[in-house]
Amino acid sequence: MMKNIFFLILFLFFASAVFGQAIYSPQDSAVCVSKFDFALSDSLYSKPIGEAVVEIAKSFIGDEYQAHTLEKGEKETLVVHLTGFDCYTFIETSLALARLIKMNKTDFSDFEKEVKNLRYRNGELADYSSRLHYFSDWIFDMNKRG
């Protein structure tokens, strides 16, 4: 079983490097869909964005802290990892999901686009330096973009 998981992760990594696609697992996609289902059942789309962010964030209670979840290989690639978070990716994920719920966009591909928009300077993934690594940098970029 562990061998199969290893080969799946390896395949996803190389597919991403060759085709420039996001790196994620089927479990990440399933978590995303389950959060959209939760949001619908809890009518989060009708709540103010702040409340929606809090409710989404609370739905992750019990998930483990994981460092270095975005560092996958030499080339910067969009990584979606929803089974463990560092402080930044926890907030980023909660905000991305809440924003999409408010816009009535509940597809995993929408989530990928929103994470890319939030994670990278001007929403553009270029390389490691285009990633917003600090909250102050993120606030400055988001404020600049309105």
Image: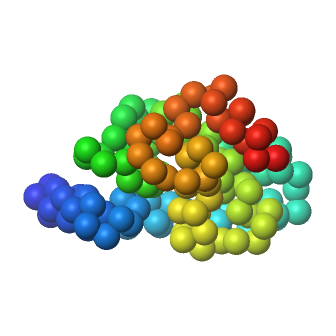
Q: Is residue 118 above or below residue 129?
A: below
**Is residue 59 at all visible to an observer of this figure?**
no
Q: Quadrant of residue 71?
A: top left
Identify the residue at image location x=80%, y=62%. Answer: 102
Give whichever of 68, 31 is nearer the camera. Answer: 68
Q: Is residue 34 left or right of residue 77?
A: right
Q: Is residue 42 above or below residue 62?
A: below
Residue 85 x/y as whole percent: 48, 39
Residue 145 x/y as whole percent: 76, 47
Identify the residue at image location x=63%, y=30%. Answer: 137
Give whichever of 53, 109 is nearer the camera. Answer: 109
Q: Quadrant of residue 101?
A: bottom right
Q: Is residue 56 above or below residue 23?
A: above
Residue 52 x/y as whole percent: 78, 51
Q: Residue furthest left?
A: 3
Residue 111 x/y as whole percent: 58, 63
Identify the residue at image location x=82%, y=47%. Answer: 146
Give whichever of 58, 123 is nearer the camera. Answer: 123
**Is residue 49 at all visible to an observer of this figure?**
yes
Q: Is residue 1 left or right of residue 45?
A: left
